[in-house]
Amino acid sequence: MTTTTPRPALHRPATDRPGPVPGSDPGSDPALTSADAYLRLVQAGPAAAVARRLGLPRPPVLRRHVPGAPLVEGPVLVLGRGAEADALAGLLAAAPAAGGRADGWDLDVHRHPTEGLRYGAVVLALTGLEHPGDLADPVLALAGVLRRLAPAGRVVTVSRPARAGDPPARAAARQAVDGFLRSLAKELRGGATGNGVVVADGVDVLAPAVLGTLRFLLSARSAFVDGQLLPVDSGAGTLPADPERPLEGRVAVVTGAARGIGAAIASVLARDGARVVAVDVPAAGEALAGVANGVRGTALALDVTSRDAGRRILEHALARHGHLDVVVHNAGITRDKLLANTTPDRWASVLAVNVEAPLRITEHLLAAGALTDAPRVVALASTSGIAGNRGQTGYAASKAAVMGMVAATAPLLAAVGGTANAVAPGFVETEMTARIPALTRQVARRLNTLQQGGLPVDVAEAVAFLASPAAGGILGQTLRVCGQSMVGR
Ligand code: NAD
């Protein structure tokens, strides 16, 4: 199980590929480079030395997904005892089955720490915890190798949720993972992250949604996801034939796709194999056409608040692509004011775009019976909707509403193998956040464990993961993409 042959990179003719994902590399986009010039400045040279001497933040450059790159850079240490730990380690080490299916991951897996070895990731298989004392062995084994975790390395826990009916010692042990993981994530350096998969009792640790979530958290796709524990509540879902193209054959609509996070979502979904319908207001026409052409998708100029938005989206998807499988409610606006200064029209417009439109569109698609084949609804929430933010009562209300919406929509889609989930970004470098006053923006960027703003692609990767067939067991959750922001949980 120790050393295996590296999986060959997947090659595809260049003509099949959509354009590069905007915002995937801070150095590739002049707007983003200038957006966080400090991050570049302190990487090396005299500025790095000064920052070190003064104890100023030195945010790392994060590793982001490049198709064909290894899932994990370096050996993987799987800690934890029992049959489930063995099963996970076996799967991670096994070669992929014939036909390239993602049954085995072909990683260089170790079950015990090896002196001097630098690990790309450590997986803590903690599903068998019965007493808080059971945590000591795996956690202290991890402590012994932490200094040898590679830059942008990963620590991922796989555990079970504490339940009211559990014996108190078991519930205590299970809940302990939460506090441990969130604290550990704050101690990791060099762009390394700590996250967890929380597998409901009765769900197999090798179920597609568990493996899909583990794969996402180990990969560079989760670069800006940190300190999060994602519940997997059912064994539903399917693993893709090609892990680089999990959305092959799927048709996805993305609202607010003309720029920012929406444009990145369109790109990442297309990169992952989806055919994309890019929606934005008519005034965004040229930019929208640019995005749609860039991903070889189609453009639909539409204000999502219009009464017939659901009908027009469905008609367009059916006419141009034959079906509709994934709906990403990304269009969003801010109209920040203290509540005392909030006018009725400001309040109404934020609620209308951010939550009433997604509600109405989803309702129409459900009523029309359009979502039939393991559909995915993914909506954009915000950490403001979790922690609250001064001057954002309306925005935070709308984003908390989105989280309520997906939690209640998920059961409506369960019968057809569907899911609804939300992604809650923290501070992300877009035109929306470029409007924040410079000093506030500079501070906002550093208020998370990774000490930087996320890029649109980071949010897009999380959306693409939740839109994928493997995420079938993630039901009504909100996944934070915030670098473990200090605000909220
Ligand atoms: P953005 O302002 O850069 O882009 C939003 C897009 O939505 C624009 O292209 C806009 O034209 C479109 N849009 C607005 N109203 C619309 C309507 N009525 N119909 C159709 N399209 C409409 O915003 P962004 O920063 O890319 O944010 C995207 C989503 O992510 C939003 O829902 C936002 O609330 C959320 N979000 C962003 C951040 C961040 O830091 N940027 C943080 C948390 C959440």
Image (cartoon, helix red, strand yellow):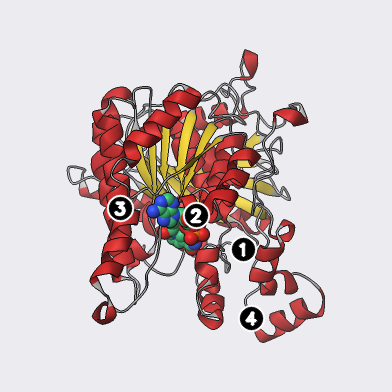
The numbered dot on residue 56 is 4
- Categorize mark 4 by other alpha carbons within 10 Å: few (<14), some (14-19), many (20+): few
Q: Earlier in the sequence, mark 4 or mark 2?
A: 4
Q: Earlier in the sequence, mark 2 or mark 1?
A: 1
Q: Earlier in the sequence, mark 3 or mark 4?
A: 4
Q: Is residue 73 left or right of residue 164?
A: right
- Is residue 298 at all visible to an observer of this figure? yes
Residue type marked 1: Arg
Q: Nearer the viewer, mark 3 or mark 2?
A: 2
Q: Secondary structure at mark 3?
A: helix
Q: CA distance from mark 1 to mark 4?
A: 14 Å
Q: Secondary structure at mark 1?
A: loop
Quarter-of-image position of residue 65: top right
| Residue corresponding to mark 2 | 283
Give the residue drawn at x 66%, y 46%. Answer: 120
| Residue corresponding to mark 1 | 189
Q: Position of residue 369 (x, y in %)?
A: 28, 25
Determine whether 209 is above or below 353 in the image.
above
Q: Earlier in the sequence, mark 1 or mark 4?
A: 4
- Categorize mark 3 by other alpha carbons within 10 Å: few (<14), some (14-19), many (20+): many
Q: Secondary structure at mark 2?
A: helix
Q: Nearer the viewer, mark 4 or mark 2?
A: 2
Name the foreground residue: 448 vs 344: 344
Q: Quadrant of the N terminus?
A: top right
